[in-house]
């Protein structure tokens, strides 16, 4: 029996089509399913409630109790469930764990996954998924061979543990985009020295799959960002005697391996790849200019990136080209009219984009159906070619630090560009301001892109007025907020305390113990006078306004 093993930590809203002759061991999804059951969350919370009172244990208990409350709500949305899972993962990965988890990310307690020595050190430390790794490794002894699949660096600590646990008599293979891109360094790590790195392996075919208890999702074929897909129209037939200049070579889909990307594809080529099934995933922004081709290919969800919207153009993050805003808007409208969801990720920190241009972008009319969130701009090391528009004389690319032997991007200097010291602060500010307009995705996972808020595209005539909640109308708990009673304060002081925790905004608010019990169960609309009757009427509406502004409560349309 040949085992295809998917180590934690990856996008568990995707499942692969298992190649013929292989058996899947999805330790990543098994881990998330195990720790997110009602019983597991309750057990983890009870253990912290009974254990020593510390600031860390109270923070973890707050996350677990909030997640527990949100997971039990009858009206929980898909995003609420994903946010609850993210809170559980964070709560379970505090010290002494060597890794800190979020829904879509991992951090080493001391170090980075870009440094192999840091990864080697953390392999011997506890991890939230240690139980799931051990269970997967139990199957190795009877395996014909074991293949570890590494899509991203997030999986490296767990993959190193599994490689070390594989018996010497069982052939060990390592495949996947990250493994192939960093083969030279990985092959020097002790647990991978005997492994065969399989470069000629066709990329796994991924499908979106809901987590148990979540909303039903269309099982779309999903195209990862690593395949660098851009959808284009077929080439125009040549006139007799005409020569093709600067043409695009057809994509040989049968030859696409972990070392290659899809690049530019026509609708027909994509249908060959997907077998004609509907699909979603990451595409280059230029694809929106060819909306009809996207529709013809079977696209249902398109995730694009942009760096800025300025001067009638949109800056594309991977090529550096500026695309015409009006043409993109025309394509976006066509996609929306056809029921295709267009999701955008804002790449912040691109060469030549200063804070003034970011402010102009934030003030621009909506172009995309939904801005999922912000992410840092990276100049990928896998792009050694220098023919991109970003590669100009005024941009000075630099080499990564010498000790970062697993670096994935190169630093650079460019005028009118955010400095590294300002990047995190600016990204946080932009995220908070976007959040006031519409909820952001809980993480960079596929399922989060299939559902969520929709922004109205600009129209020529004034839109009809919408019904708005009235100041004295019904209220209820915010969909992503829970009120939790702890046995101690968040700084570890041993006295009972109530907190409101919103897993969407990250806000935590200390609550009055006289009011919190009545609000904690407010999952259905009710009038403020019925819930907060003990508060004098003159102060009641001011209190409600404050709790609405803090995303504890929300007003319900009357």
Image (spheres, grey):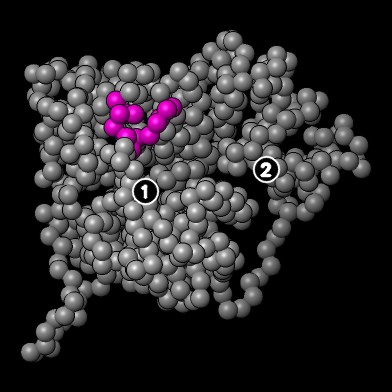
Does residue 313 sit above or below 257 in this rendering? below
Q: Quadrant of residue 407?
A: top left
For the point 43% across and 62% down, which residue is it? Answer: 414
Residue 97 is tagged as none
Label 1: state its secondary structure: loop
Q: Contact, CB < 8 Å: mark 1 with mark 2?
A: no
- Residue drawn where x is 66% and y is 18% of the image: 492
On whether residue 527 falls in the magenta region, the answer is no
Per the image, label 2 sits on a secondary structure element best described as loop
* Residue 234 in sight here: yes
Residue 281, x across and y down, in percent: 34, 54
Foreground: 355 or 11?
355
Q: Which residue is mark 1?
A: 218
Query: Is residue 75 something one can see in this rendering?
Result: no
Q: Position of residue 179 (x, y in %)?
A: 21, 39
95 lies above or below 76: above
Q: Which residue is mark 2?
A: 551
Give percent across and percent down for residue 410. Answer: 34, 51
Is residue 304 depicted above or below 485 in this figure? below
Q: Which residues are magenta?
A: 108-120
Outermost residue toward the bottom?
240
Horizontal side, residue 103 vs residue 3: left or right: right
Q: Quadrant of residue 102?
A: top left
């Amino acid at each position: 029996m040949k085992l295809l093993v998917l180590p934690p930590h990856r996008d568990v809203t995707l499942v692969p089509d298992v190649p013929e002759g292989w058996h899947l061991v999805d330790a990543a999804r098994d881990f998330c399913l195990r720790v997110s059951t009602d019983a597991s969350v309750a057990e983890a919370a009870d253990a912290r409630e009974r254990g020593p009172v510390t600031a860390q244990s109270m923070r973890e208990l707050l996350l677990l109790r909030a997640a527990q409350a949100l997971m039990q709500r009858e009206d929980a949305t898909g995003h609420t469930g994903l946010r609850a899972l993210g809170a559980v993962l964070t709560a379970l990965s505090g010290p002494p764990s060597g890794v800190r988890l979020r829904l879509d990310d991992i951090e080493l307690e001391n170090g980075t996954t870009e440094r192999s020595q840091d990864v080697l050190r953390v392999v011997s430390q506890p991890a939230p998924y240690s139980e799931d790794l051990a269970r997967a490794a139990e199957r190795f002894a009877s395996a014909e061979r074991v293949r570890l699949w590494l899509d991203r660096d997030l999986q490296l600590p767990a993959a190193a543990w599994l490689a070390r646990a594989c018996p010497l008599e069982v052939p060990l293979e390592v495949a996947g985009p990250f493994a192939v891109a960093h083969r030279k360094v990985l092959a020097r790590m002790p647990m991978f020295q005997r492994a065969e790195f399989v470069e000629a392996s066709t990329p796994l075919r991924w499908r979106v799959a809901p987590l148990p208890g979540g909303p039903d999702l269309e099982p779309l074929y999903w195209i990862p960002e690593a395949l660098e897909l851009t959808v284009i129209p077929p080439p125009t037939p040549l006139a007799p005697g005409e020569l093709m200049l600067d043409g695009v070579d057809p994509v040989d889909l049968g030859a696409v391996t972990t070392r290659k990307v899809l690049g530019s594809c026509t609708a027909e080529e994509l249908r060959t790849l997907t077998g004609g099934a509907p699909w979603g995933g990451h595409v280059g922004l230029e694809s929106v200019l060819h909306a009809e081709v996207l529709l013809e290919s079977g696209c249902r969800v398109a995730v694009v990136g942009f760096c800025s919207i300025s001067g009638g153009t949109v800056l594309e993050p991977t090529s550096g080209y500026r695309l015409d805003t009006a043409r993109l808007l025309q394509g976006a409208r066509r996609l929306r009219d056809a029921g295709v969801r267009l999701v955008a990720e804002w790449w912040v920190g691109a060469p030549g984009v200063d804070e003034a241009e970011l402010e102009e972008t934030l003030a621009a009319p909506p172009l995309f159906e939904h801005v999922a969130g912000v992410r840092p701009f990276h100049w990928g090391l896998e792009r050694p070619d220098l023919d991109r528009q970003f590669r100009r004389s005024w941009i000075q690319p630099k080499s990564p630090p010498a000790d970062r032997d697993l670096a994935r991007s190169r630093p650079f200097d460019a005028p009118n560009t955010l400095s590294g010291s300002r990047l995190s602060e600016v990204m946080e500010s932009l995220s908070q301001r976007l959040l006031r307009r519409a909820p952001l995705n809980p993480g960079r996972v596929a399922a989060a892109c299939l559902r969520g808020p929709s922004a109205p595209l600009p129209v020529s005539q004034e839109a009809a007025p919408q019904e708005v909640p009235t100041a004295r109308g019904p209220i209820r708990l915010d969909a992503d907020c829970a009120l939790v009673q702890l046995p101690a304060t968040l700084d570890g002081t041993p006295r009972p305390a109530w907190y409101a925790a919103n897993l969407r905004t990250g806000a935590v608010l200390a609550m009055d113990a006289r009011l919190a019990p009545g609000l904690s169960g407010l999952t259905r609309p009710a009038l403020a006078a019925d819930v907060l009757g003990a508060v004098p009427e003159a102060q009641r509406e001011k209190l409600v306004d404050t709790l609405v502004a803090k995303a504890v409560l929300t007003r319900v349309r009357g």
